Amino acid sequence: MQSTYQSWGNFPKVSQRIRSIPWRKKPLLLPETPDTVLAHGLGRSYGDVCLNNNGILLTTRKLNRFIQFDVDEGVLRCEAGVSLAEILALCVPQGWFLPVTPGTQFVTIGGAIANDVHGKNHHCAGTFGRHVLQFELLRSDGERLLCTPTSNEPYYAATIGGLGLTGLITWAEIKLKRISHRAMQVESIQFSQLDEFFELSQQSDQDYDYTVAWLDCNNSQALGRGIFFRGNHVAADEIPKDWKLPRFNRLPPLLRTMPINLPGFVLNRWTISAFNTFYYKKTRQSQLIDYQPFFYPLDAILEWKRLYGKNGFLQYQFVIPDHRMLKEILQKIVASGLGSFLAVLKTFGELASPGLLSFPRPGVTLALDFPIKGAVTFELLAQLDEKVREMGGAVYPCKDARLSARHFQAFYPQWTKFAEYIDPRFSSSFWRRVTETPLCVKS
Amino acid sequence: MRKILIIGATSAIAQETAKLFAEKHDALFLVGRDVDKLEAITADLKVRGAHQVAYYTLDLNEFDQHEPMLEQAYKSLEGLDTVLIAYGTLDDQKACEQDFAQAEQALRTNFMSVVSLLTPIANRLEKQHYGCIAVISSVAGDRGRQSNYVYAAAKGGLSLFLQGLRSRLHSANVCVLTIKPGFVDTPMTTNFKKGALWAQPETVARGIFRAIKWRRNVIYLPWFWRFIMMVIRLIPEPLFKRMKL
């Protein structure tokens, strides 16, 4: 069946056949043709790591069963297509939380492993991959590898952050984090320049499990202003009795869905600037909020990608080891006037990931959205790639749709070692682009 | 806590409905053909909170195995109050037209085998004076169309059977629910082009769950199919036979 599966950024537009994988114990039964395949969960990757132009997508959303949940130890085993939202719905009422969560809960656990995602607690918990105890990797030749830190170790390391190229993850087991209540104690602090951010970040990393900042990238007069958020889970006995769940989360999904693609002109320099100023001026102190709006503010508006119109958008996330160089990049972005709606700033910690091709590394990371305004957008990002390379940083594949092979290979020199573990039948649009290999496997 | 028997438990709609029961801590007895699939579903339902889950493998075309299965279900659940029958095949109409053996198989699976199951189930529930029987029929059974009239005949026959059974069991305080889903995005319909009328199995499952709770008689899922089928039934036969439906 031909399909119109796209990724979250709505770019690039591709065409691929779909094959649903509903049962984990059944063989893959790949077609005789040399077409390549790629696992696809909820398609929340922004660019093309989850796409396989002219190939086959193995959709894993029907692999959404739990297998075992040890409530005493907090060890959960489930199929690869289970979403983080489904895990939270099961675990939070029983006093457990995801060890690491990205900014959306609408990703599958297979996708979280394949992109080795990180969250607001990277400075104390590292990446998602650090909490994966074991998983099963189904290779195209039918072999099933049980991967743990001690068995099939090379495949364990290659698959964590391996962009789905090493085979199909059928199930995985993760270690959860103990919580006693779903609420979070959150503080938001304004800062007016980057140095203040780094100071806040350094102070907070000790005492707060979760830290992140929002940064205004639009206003050249106020470069480096933003809001720093820090939070912790709260003990149940610290919760006032009249505390209630926020009302918005209880609305039915239809009322929370962005219904149409907004026309491209709605988000322009002035509206975004106005939004940023409004957001900055909105002062808040310490407050008790539910974990949902703290971790997933954008999940409240389903299909929010439609804000950017039908042309779609690019997200750009990079890490650089030396935070003093961040200003230079920021100035370049502000000068371009290509406007980023949302800019998220965080310092990564020292904890290393078991993943061979993982993105996070010590330093400071910034993530920004760029509505696609044609060649100028791509040109700017290419220039940023070059800056990031000079500074010894890297760009996040999970969010990328346009990185050149040269830059990818500079950011991830270990890619040749990683390539030894790629399943010969698996490929992706992303991988072909950044390694410049032809479409089909060689017979 | 309900004691629920699900026949055809590996179908997409049955799986989604079973999850809703599991979240309510009901006890479940699953019947299907494939051990691997039943095992996967059983584990999932246990994690989701089911009070107990057991499974039983059976090819439902073996009619003489129906009674022993039911016996086992009663033993395992220590009683029975809800039955969901959720299996079926969507056979190739063209093949059924050419070959009676194919048509017979379609009728056996979609109609005869359900009657064979319902006979002992109805008798037991009638005797115990409580319970609910929910059976998945289809909107296709509301009118015979040239594109799938063998399937329609089986489902239409099933709907009529259930109508009569409902009336018979009413005085015994047993409800009989006829579920008529429209187009549902399941493995049974993998090869169909999907459009705006298609529903996800989760949506249909929620409808079934509610209908069982409220002891409804006939439900269309999603709801708008009631009106679509009303219009289709109203088309006069002289006109209908000329339509390429």
Image (cartoon, rainbow, N blue to C red):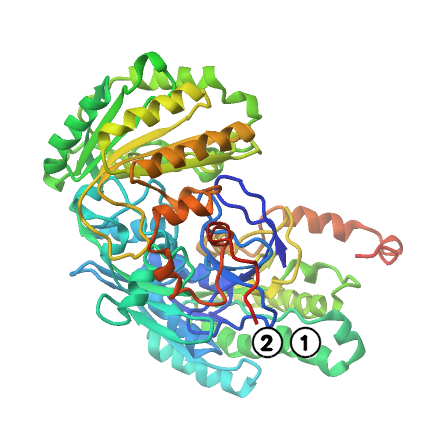
From the image, tell me which residue sits under label 2: B115
In the picture, the quarter occupied by the N terminus of chain B is bottom left
Q: Is residue B226 left or right of residue A141?
A: right
- The circle on residue B154 is none
Q: Chain of mark 2?
A: B
Count of numbered circles in the view = 2
Tag 2 or tag 1, which sits nearer the N-term? Answer: 1
Label 2: how many Cα within 10 Å (few below 14, some 14–19, many 20+): some
In the picture, the quarter occupied by the C terminus of chain B is bottom right
Q: Specify whether residue B106 is in view.
A: yes
Query: Which residue is drawn at the image coordinates 41% and 16% (left, top)?
Result: A273
Q: Is residue A437 left or right of residue A334?
A: right
Label 1: how many Cα within 10 Å (few below 14, some 14–19, many 20+): many
Above or below for A165 versus A226: below
Q: Position of residue A260 (x, y in %)?
A: 56, 32
Is residue B189 or residue B3 the one in the foreground?
A: B189
Query: Which residue is drawn at the image coordinates 32% and 66% (left, top)?
Result: A155
Q: Secondary structure at mark 1?
A: helix
Q: Position of residue A390 (x, y in %)?
A: 33, 36
Q: Say which quarter of the image contains residue B240.
A: bottom right
Above or below for A286 versus B167: above
Q: Chain of mark 1?
A: B
